[in-house]
Amino acid sequence: MKHLLEQQSSASAKNYYFQVRGTKLELPVSIIKGKESGPTVLITAGIHGSEYPGIEAAKRLIQEIDPDRLVGNLLIFPCINQRAFFERAAFINPADGKNLNRCFPGNPTGTESERLAYALETEIFYLADFYLDFHSGDLSEQLESFVFVPGFFGEDSVMQKARQAANYLNLPFGVASQSRTGAYNHASIIGVPSLLIERGGYGERCAKDIAGFVDDAKRIMTHLGMLEHSLLKKKELKLLTQICYFDSTLTGLWTPACKIGNVVKKGQLLGVTEDFFGNILGEYTAEQDGQILYQVTSLPIVSGEVLIAYGY
């Protein structure tokens, strides 16, 4: 990939397919090279193949960004998890049953997801000066729009660059990630300022979510001096520093008691699992005060699946 970027002429846009070593995967990628040298921004979408708004937004950015008005380089991978996308699979890669975003840093001799994660780390992440990863609620997930920022792992200077950039996004709040894994977290750990932006869900392609992602990317590029935008304003992003995940301990019929964005109190009911006869199998209550970030809304739930997450 590096040689393609170096060989491509200035003020040009070209589309390629990136071969993932040890697999049959060929990932579409667009390289948009500006009229002048400058930062390189990497954008990925579709790490979870059924999170559609980010995929649509990446496709739109490929069409909208004018190389003659760009300083620096833009690398856009509109759909990373190809197999999950075409098989309409939620959360996992059907090739190996793994959640790609839990496979970093990857393994060059591992399963398809592990090899894909390894290729992204070793061949793609190092090309970037900044990385944006687009996500949504999956097919069964309802989600509030927000941004994950690197929280606790990586060089302070790298995390600060990401947090400063997040202040230019038009989002209600951010969440400081506690995780070491995930594409954007791993990129941050190896020295690339990175953000994971969440918009939309339910397998829908709402226009406002797609437009929101496009605006996010343009705001970050403007902040980095890659685009001209006289109206860009900075605000101090509200940051939630902790996140609580509830995994289902039961298999049954799930009914959430809250809506995304709701502020809940410690001890408040979050949802109920029942059997097919309407008997209550279990209830879930909040362990802390917090704000609902995302939750599963589909009726079936299997033990071990994530039910709900809230930040505080």
Image (cartoon, grey):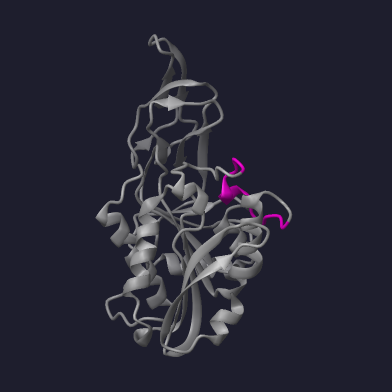
* Residue at the spot 55% in from the left edge and 73% down from the top edge: 128
193 or 61: nearer the eye? 61
Residue 244 coordinates in the image, percent (x, y): 51, 39
Q: Indicate the position of residue 110 as horizontal and vertical percent values.
A: 71, 51
Residue 101 falls inside the magenta stretch: yes
Residue 95 left/right relative to 197: right
Above or below residue 121? Residue 221 is below
Residue drawn at (49%, 73%) of the image: 41
Residue 42: percent from left, percent from top: 50, 70
User: Which residue is situated farthest in the right direction here?
Assistant: 109
Q: Say if the magenta span includes residue 201.
A: no
Seen in the picture, residue 264 relative to 138 is either above or below; the reply is above
Q: Give the range drawn in magenta.
A: 96-108
Q: In x, y percent, where is residue 20?
A: 61, 62
Looking at the magenta stretch, what is its main secondary structure? loop
Which of the 4 image quadrants contains residue 127? bottom right
Q: Is residue 287 visible?
A: yes
Quarter containing the N terminus? bottom right
Residue 225 can be seen in this image = no
